[in-house]
Amino acid sequence: MCGLVAIAGDSSAVRLATLALYALQHRGQEAAGLVSASGGRLHARHGLGLVADVLPEEALRALPGRSALGHVRYATAGGSSIQNAQPLVFDHVHGPIAIAHNGTLTNALTLRRRLEARGAIFRTTSDSEVIVHLIARQKGPVERAIAAALRKVEGAYSLLFLTPESLIAARDPQGFRPLVLGRKGKAFVFASETTALNQIGAELVREVEPGEMIVVSKGRLRSTRLSPRPAKRALCVFEQIYFARPDSSVFGLSVQATRRQLGRELAKEMFGVEADAVVPVPDSGVPAAIGFAEESGIPFELGFVRSHYVGRSFIQPAQGMRDYAVMLKLMPVREVLAGKRIILVDDSLVRGTTSRRLCRILRAAGVRAIHMAVSSPPILSPCYYGIDTPQRKELIAAQRSLPGIVRFLGVDSLHYLSLEGLLRAAGREGGPKGTDYCTACFTRRYPTPLTDLRAA
Ligand code: SF4
């Protein structure tokens, strides 16, 4: 997962893009970067760390131009070194070009080996650089070269390209990752999530359609299709469950409302479980817990207080101290919890190690019974489309039976939302249909060929 933003046609493009990147920080905290275009050149600033560290005011003064492209990175393919910080900037036969990518290509390694065999020299280990090499091998204007290159790649990509003359957006035919188009006055804006548009006072125009390429040049917008036939959609349902910010609208649906609906569906499926309070795991479990409480009539309680001041530099403590480390972030409220039977709501269960610690902390705070309620189905398989889920051997639901997980977590019962419940909540009227979603991490049904995995 990564966050993208681009603005074309505003004298404050660099500052607006930086502000928008703050709103996308949840999509990546390892690196940030910004590129602007002026005088036939691109000007870049990259660094490891948060937007505030990489793009302070004095850095922005060195980035002139009325167009800007920004990226926050969460490393999934290629590792987290500074060389992989995006936007990647290259000079090649089509002139200078910057690329920012959200998603992971599933045939990047195969293509890279082929390109290297023909003499290509790669500068980074990022899958996104494969696209640049493919573009460089195409003839004709840059947008035609980009379209031809994208027809060769498989997997997930929401992409933004900046050249001195144009801004280009493209989304893979399945539409795994979100990308929206907005307007601010006469300027065109693209962003991963609508919250970035709201941050800078831009209006949402529409989503960039799966399989669509949009070129903004000389104040005009042109839309083309990457391939003549539309593919079956595979929108990442995990964006709705966990990744996107609740104040965004993703794939046409309010994320907050969808998560609330997930909680309602879960409450219906858990009808009959007796409890005194519904307690969310902050922050991502909160909307689902609200929905659960509304549907079940069981009171909602904030049983944890979250500290926002735990730095990223916190060093993993020795075994035996780890419960205290979890409490640095989430402190239980004894007065709310002692003697209660609770429904503990979380959005997903990945390895189960943090949930196990939370349950120990809850028991120590005097909780009488813990019924764990997860607002997504069991995660059985890794994601190959840009979400950093661990390998199968680390996924608790792939390794243990339901009673085995109950024992591991130390809960009284465990309930996952069914796949049908998830697709009912995320496939509501006004948004995509349930069948428009990718659910491969729950079903192992991957919607594209996994070419690199097969070749490995
Ligand atoms: S495998 Fe899971 S996380 Fe990855 S794109 Fe599909 S739904 Fe999203």
Image (tube, grey):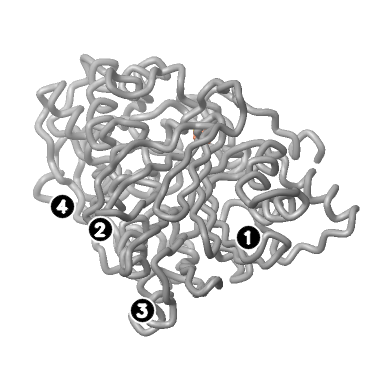
| Some atom of ligand 1 lies within 8 Å of the CB belonging to the residue at label 4 | no
Give the CA distance from mark 2 to mark 1. Answer: 31 Å
What is the number of the mark on residue 257? none
Give the residue type that dot 4 points to: Val
Give the CA distance from mark 2 to mark 4. Answer: 37 Å
Q: Secondary structure at mark 4?
A: loop
Task: Read off the residue under disc 4.
Answer: 333
> Observer-nearest residue: 58 or 166?
166
Q: Residues within 10 Å of mark 1 (few under 14, many from 20)?
A: some
Give the residue type that dot 3 points to: Pro
Query: Which label's residue is closer to the chain start, 4 or 1?
Result: 1
Q: Secondary structure at mark 2?
A: loop
Task: Read off the residue under disc 2.
Answer: 200
Query: Looking at the image, do the residues carrying marks 4 and 1 touch, with CB atoms under 8 Å apart?
Result: no
Query: Which label's residue is closer to the chain start, 2 or 1?
Result: 1
Give the CA distance from mark 4 to mark 1. Answer: 39 Å
Q: Choose mark 2 or mark 1, whichever is in front.
A: 2
| Residue 198 in sight in this render | yes
What is the number of the mark on residue 56? 3
Horizontal placement of 245 versus 29: left or right? left
Give the residue type that dot 1 points to: Gly
Which residue: 58% across, 37% down? 382
> Observer-nearest residue: 160 or 268?
160
